[in-house]
Amino acid sequence: MPEHADTHIGTRMREIRKRRGLSQSDLSGAAGVSLSLIRKLEQGQLHTTRMETAHKLARAMRVHTSQLLDRDDVQHPEPSEPWLPLRQAVEAPAVEPDEEPTIAGVQALLPAIRKSYFANRLAELSTLLGPALRDADALGDSRPARTLRAHLLQIAGSALTQVREFDAAESALRRALDDAPDRIRGAAVVTTWSWLLVRQGRLAEARTLATRWADDTEPRISRATPEELAAWGWLLLQASAACLRDNRRGEAADMMRLAQSVSILTGRELPRGQDRLTTWGPATVGYKAAERYVVLDQPDRVVAMARRGKGSQKASTEYWRHRLDVAKAHTLLRQYTEAVDTLSGIQEQAPEWLTSQRYAQDILADVIGRRRTLTPQMRDLADALSVPV
C-alpha cells in the first residue's frame, strides 16, 4: 500500500464533499483532521497526504478510500431537490442527535415508512426516512440496531433506485449489506442491489452478484422455511433477469425454471409481512416470467398471461411493474389504445410511482410518435409524465 495519496485527492475530495452537502468545516469535524489541511488539499497547496488521513476523509464521506485516490472520469449528476435530504441522510457522516434515540423509538416509525413505500408516496417517504436513518445511525452496533438500520437502508436504496438516484442508492445498499445481521436479510439487500445494477446496465456485475448469493444461500429443501425459500427464489429471479439482458438466454431460462419450482414449493403467495419489501410466490414469479417475454420480443405471450392473471396482487409494486410490461406489449402489438388505457389505470391508482418510471415515459413516447393526433387521455398522460407532444 502506498504511503501517500496521489495528486488528485484534493479535487476528488472537493467533488465528493459537495455532493454530500458538507462544508469544509463539517468534513473536518467528522474526519478528525484539521480544517487547514482540508483547505490546502482542495486548493492544491498540498498534493499528497498520508494514507491514514485519506482513510479518515473517505470514511467520513462514506466512500471507499480508493475513490479518493484513483482518477475517476465518471460524471455524477446533481441530486434532484426532493431527494437531497434522503441522499444526505444516507451519505453524510452521522451526527450526534439532540436526544439519544432508542431502538423502540425508531421501530415505531417503521409502519408509517413502510406504508408510504408500499403506497408509492415517494416524496413523503423521503421526508420520513431521512430523520429515521439519522436516528438509526446513532443506535450503535447491537444486533437489533443493525437489523433495523439494514431494513431502513434497504428501503432507502430501493426508493432511490426507483427515482434514478443511483449513486445514493448504491451507498444505501452497501451500508445495508454491512449491517445485515443474517443471510436472509443480506439476500434481500442483494436482491435490491442486483436490480439497481440491472437498471444501470451493469449486467455482468448484477449477474455475478445475484448468482453468487443464490449459490451461497441455497437452502436444504427438505427443511427450508418459507422465508428461506423466498430469499433464495428472489435471488434466482434477479440472476435470471441479468442473464437474459446480458444475452445469456440458456442460463436465464435455467434460473427462471428453478425460481418457478421454488415458488411451487412455497405453495402460496407470501405477503410482505413486517420485514420483506416484496411478495413471493406463484403470482410474483408469473409477473417476472411475463417480463421475460418483453425482453424476448414475444408481446402476445405477455398479454395472454396478463389476461389469465387479471386481478391478482394489485397492491404490490411487482404488480405495477408488470402492468408497465403489459403496456409495452400492447405497444409492440400496435394496440395503442390498450397501451394508453393500461397506463391510465396505473396513473389512477399509483400516480406518484408512475411519474418516476422512465419505462413509462418511453412507452408513452413510442405511442405518441406513432399517432397523427392525440386523444385527451394521451395528452393528460403526456403532461403527467412530462413527455413532449
Image (cartoon, rainbow, N blue to C red):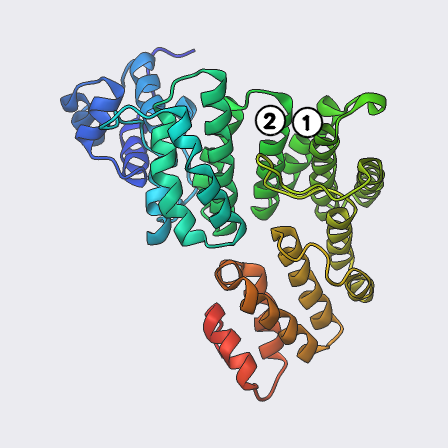
| Residue 210 in the figure: left or right of residue 76 | right
Residue 93: percent from left, percent from top: 31, 28
Seen from the viewer's position, the closer of residues 366 and 348 is 348
Q: Secondary structure at mark 1?
A: helix
Give how far across and how far down residue 343 sits, in percent.
60, 69
Residue 312 sits above or below residue 77 on the image: below
**Residue 90 horizontal/vertical position (percent):** 39, 35
Marks 2 and 1: in contact by CB < 8 Å?
yes
Circle number at residue 186: 2
Task: Give the number of the mark in front: 1 or 2.
Answer: 2
Q: Amino acid at mark 2?
A: Gly
Identify the residue position indicated by label 1 in the image: 213
Q: Position of residue 79 (x, y in %)?
A: 36, 48
Q: CA distance from mark 1 to mark 2?
A: 9 Å
Which residue corresponds to the image point at 32% horizontal and 12% vertical from the top-left?
Answer: 52
Q: Would residue 195 appear left or right of 59 to someone viewing this image?
A: right
Question: Where 209 sits versus 85, above or below?
Answer: above
Q: Residues within 10 Å of mark 1 (few under 14, many from 20)?
A: many
